[in-house]
Image (cartoon, rainbow, N blue to C red):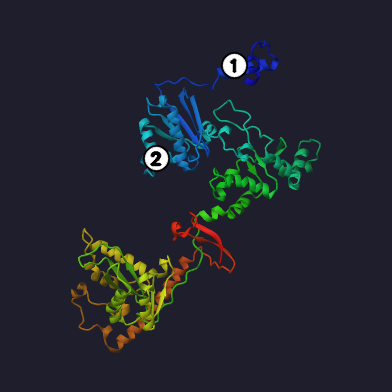
Amino acid sequence: MFALLKRKNKRNAKIHFSDEQLKKFKELKRRLCNPPVLHLPDFKQPMHLRTDASKFAVGGVLFQVVDGVERPIAYTSRKMKSAELNYPTQQQELLAIVHALAAFRIYCLDKPPIIETDHNSLEGLFTQKMANRRLARWYDILAEYQPVFSYLPGAKNGIADALSRRPDLQPETKFFHDLSVTSFDDTSFSLAISEVSGDSELISRIKKSYKKDRDIQAILAAIKKRKSNSKPKRERQQHKKYRCYSEANGLLWYQTPVDDAQRIVVPNDVKLRQTIISECHDTNYGDHPGAERTYLKLARHWYWSKMLKSIQKFIADCEPCRRNKPRLTKPPGLLEPLSIPDERWRSISMDFITDLPRTKRDVDSIWVVVDRLTKRCHFVPTTKNVNAEGVARLFIDNIWKLHGMPANIVSDRDRKFVSAFWQHVFKSIGTMLSMTAAHRAQGDGQTERMNRTLEEYLRCFVGPLQDDWDVHLANAEFAANLTVNSSTKLAPFEADLGYIPLNPLQLASEQLESVPKSRRGAEFHERQAAILLRCREALAQAQERMRDVYDQNRVEQVFEVGDKVYLSTQHLDPKHSGLPNSTKFGPKWI
């Protein structure tokens, strides 16, 4: 509009308006004299600041409400720096507020400004825990203004949204240059895209692919016939399914009654569709979102049949996503419980609780041993630095003398159990040492659960300095063996010995027998056999319950030789292994 008038601003130019220039001149006067124009601030009234952040820029508008009408005072926007592009969404929205406050500092210092944002979490900003130094610096800046945050739905945040999406601030990618703003809606703050430039490479590819797509050609033909009033009623009904389509500027558009705007129809060209998805998903401003989020971003401007399905397939093959994103489903593989022992103390499990406060007896660790059938346990105080020979001595003094030598031992891959000496001891007595897989504590879940129970017990009885825990170990062991186990439904004492040892509560009873019936002659032997059978059946039922719960939503995954898999780096140090800084690396062959 102003370009036509600017031609008359040349030196020695004669002032002579054509009909078109005179019309533009009057239109320019009308717009300069009517809202929305910049309003002079009234410092007696509160200031309103409305901000927004896109993936590449921030923007804001300062305004006041006069007679129920919003009057803009000033606008601001700027492009994000390269580091700011990587900020989380909340921090990008907060960056827009900090930038706007700095730009409108002279207006906002007198009274606390009312900040309107479409990011709901910012309402409770000052009650949230600070996560880094950047937020701490921004808190100091905000404290100077004492702003009042107010949530504004995104649909009502038109002006700030438009300022943060200015075309001249957009990254230099062909994807953003496909759409260009050619006109403005002068009735509100918001900017409206009214045309699509047809000279971009992507748009040219779309138009060219239209000619090769039979479905697109059928739709275009139906649109042409629809414009004719001479077609019969049957033919009009036949083309009713194309009523959501329209043609303009050489492009096919799609819009349903619930859509806010028209969307460009993308032809059935796999490479073309992958290019559009890649621009939205793989670029720096794309952030590698999931399939649903990518679909919601693309569906604003683009449309093709089975769009979500093609996006899901594209993201499923995205190597950065597969390598860096964590697994959201349960790990594959069904539960494989250990076999149930046939006899008491034939199979035991053992583990160490280390790094406890050192006591007066100079111990800082607990050696935990549990019988896998009866669940009876022993807690032995020791030191963290005990060697293989020392562990063997503890075993002979505390386990061998009471229960004999087990046929099977389940332990983790601790160096104490894999040393040459320890292996030699078990080999010489004919015992097989079974080891769980590395970083799989649930393989020895029995001992891990006992460790937790023991730690909970000690916390209840240790002194303030926590250096007397070894004094309470005997009581802790007695209490653990006296408590009914949830798997066997028996107390470990009863499952192992056939009876429950006396405790102070039983001694206080006046109905004690001199010799319990359960410990007399043949009855005792029969009871022990019955208890053994009961324990085995109860453990089998417990394993079935565990398997039913564990196997829910899990699948048995079988790998064949030659399959490619990703290897987790969770338990590997990238500094020493030379692996990339990601959660997985690969794919590698099995």
The residue located at (63%, 30%) in the rendering is: 182
- Looking at the rendered structure, the secondary structure element under dot 1 is helix
Q: Position of residue 323 (x, y in %)?
A: 53, 56
Q: Position of residue 558 (x, y in %)?
A: 56, 68
Disc 2 marks which residue?
A: 135
Query: Looking at the image, which is closer to me, 97 or 136?
Result: 136
The residue located at (68%, 41%) in the rendering is: 244
Residue 492, quarter of the rendered image? bottom left
Is 39 situated left or right of 23 in this image?
left
N-term mark: 1 or 2: 1
Q: State the CA–CA distance, disc 1 to disc 2.
A: 46 Å
In the picture, the quarter occupied by the C terminus is bottom right
Query: Looking at the image, which is closer to me, 543 or 414?
Result: 414
In this view, 426 is above or below 444: below
| Mark nearer the viewer, 1 or 2 | 2
Q: Position of residue 442 (x, y in %)?
A: 41, 67
Query: Looking at the image, which is closer to me, 573 or 77?
Result: 573
Residue 373 appears in the figure: no
Residue 20, quarter of the rendered image? top right
Q: Which mark is residue 29?
A: 1
Residue neighbourhood size for the residue with mark 2, other residues' Cα within 10 Å, grouped as few (<14), some (14–19), many (≥20): some
